[in-house]
Image (cartoon, rainbow, N blue to C red):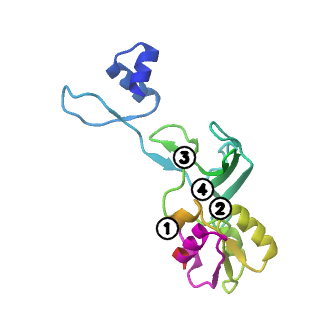
Amino acid sequence: IIALAAKVWNLRQGEAAQELAGRYDFVQSARPSGATQQPVPATFTPIVPIPASAPEPPRHHPQHGQASALWCYQDTQGRALAYAVRFDTQDGKAVLPLCFGRYGTGLPQWHWKALPEPRSLYNLPALAALPDTAPVLLVEGEKTADAAQVYFPHYAVLTWSGGGNAVSKADFSPLQGRNVVIWPDNDEPGFAAALELA
């Protein structure tokens, strides 16, 4: 990136690195005198819940195009925390995480990034709305959770973000003491995820 910036801006490598650091809020690491300057990216900090002043979440991705679905992850009070966004691609689908936050001291904006672990479950307001004795149905995927909630209104139907390979990254503590039914996807990864959940 530094070499490309140096070529485009007609600068030396060190000058390009300094320019990038200033423009994109890089943090300069301490280095011995005379050492080559290497910019260190600023840390990303999500802002949760998402403030009411935040702009609408983007529905277009530079690589995947227009979104076909958008699911909002909320806390038990219904405050928006993050989104999962689906794109229908030539190879099938892509579901990407989207959250609001900032790099370093930069301006807050939307980023195609997941919240830090452990991540909140999807459909927590439904869990909070039902009594503690109400059963929970745990499925894989937001689309499945929405459909199952219609068919099983007496259950709180929840899922986690990231699919079958991200079970360990979710916060299942709100389900403590609840009766939970795990309904896997009908494939090998789905059954593997269900076993991990159990």
Which quarter of the rendering shows the N terminus?
top left
Spatial CA distance of label 1 from label 3 is: 23 Å
Q: Residue furthest top?
A: 10
Q: Secondary structure at mark 2?
A: strand
Q: As drawn, is 99 to the left or to the right of 24?
A: right
Which quarter of the rendering shows the C terminus?
bottom right
Q: Secondary structure at mark 1?
A: helix
Q: Amino acid at mark 3?
A: Gly
Q: Which residue is mark 3?
A: 101
Q: Is residue 183 magenta?
A: yes
Spatial CA distance of label 4 from label 2 is: 8 Å
Q: Residue furthest right?
A: 151
Point out the stretch of residues depicted in magenta: 170-195
Packing grade of label 1 (10 A; few <14, some 14-19, many >=20) is some
Q: As drawn, is 48 to the left or to the right of 32?
A: right
Q: Which residue is mark 4?
A: 49
Q: Are marks 4 and 1 in contact (CB under 8 Å)?
A: no
> Tag on residue 182?
none
Q: Secondary structure at mark 3?
A: strand
What residue is rendered at 79% in x and 76% in y?
153
